[in-house]
Structure formats: C-alpha cells, structure tokens
Amino acid sequence: MKNINFVTNQKGEKIALLIDLKKKNKITPEYLEDIEDIVAYELLKNQESVDYKTSINEILKKKAEK
C-alpha cells in the first residue's frame, strides 16, 4: 500500500500510522478495509496465541461457575 507509512520512534518501534490522503480517489471501501487489517495486525501481532479448545473450555467453566 503506497499511501500508508509507519512512523517510528528512536528505537525503531512503530508508534503511528500515516495515511497520505492526497490521492482521495484511491480511498475505496476495500482500501479502508486494508487499513483496518493492517492496524488490527499491528495491535495483535505481539499477543500470545491461545489454543482454541483450551480457551473455549475456560469460558464454559467460568459460565458454569456463575
């Protein structure tokens, strides 16, 4: 995506997303979805993954305790 850049701090960590809006005709619903996907990925990429079955069992166990 040519109109999207990340702003980094001195440590090289991504701290912001810069979207060039000069080419407004390029802003389509699909383009906005791509931006949302990039943001979601960046926010979640460092989260620990959890096994699906284990997670579901924990949720069900908590509901049963209530």
Image: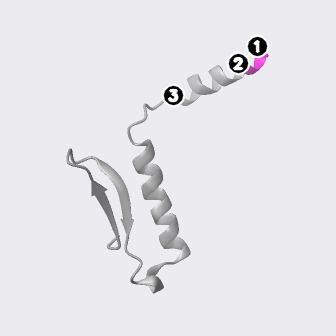
Q: Residue 54: x percent and y percent?
A: 57, 22
Q: Are marks 2 and 1 in contact (CB under 8 Å)?
A: yes
Question: Is 5 in front, or is 15?
Answer: 15
- The residue wearing badge 1 is 65
The nearer-to-camera label among 2 and 3 is 2
Seen in the picture, residue 37 relative to 63 is either above or below; the reply is below
Quadrant of the snapshot with the N terminus:
bottom left
What amino acid is at disc 2? Lys
The residue drawn where x is 20% and y is 48% is: 10
The nearer-to-camera label among 1 and 3 is 1
Q: Residue 16: x percent and y percent?
A: 36, 56
User: Which numbered disc flags the more N-terminal residue, 2 or 3?
Assistant: 3
- SS for callout 1: helix
Q: CA distance from mark 2 to mark 1?
A: 5 Å
What amino acid is at disc 3? Asp
- The residue wearing badge 2 is 62
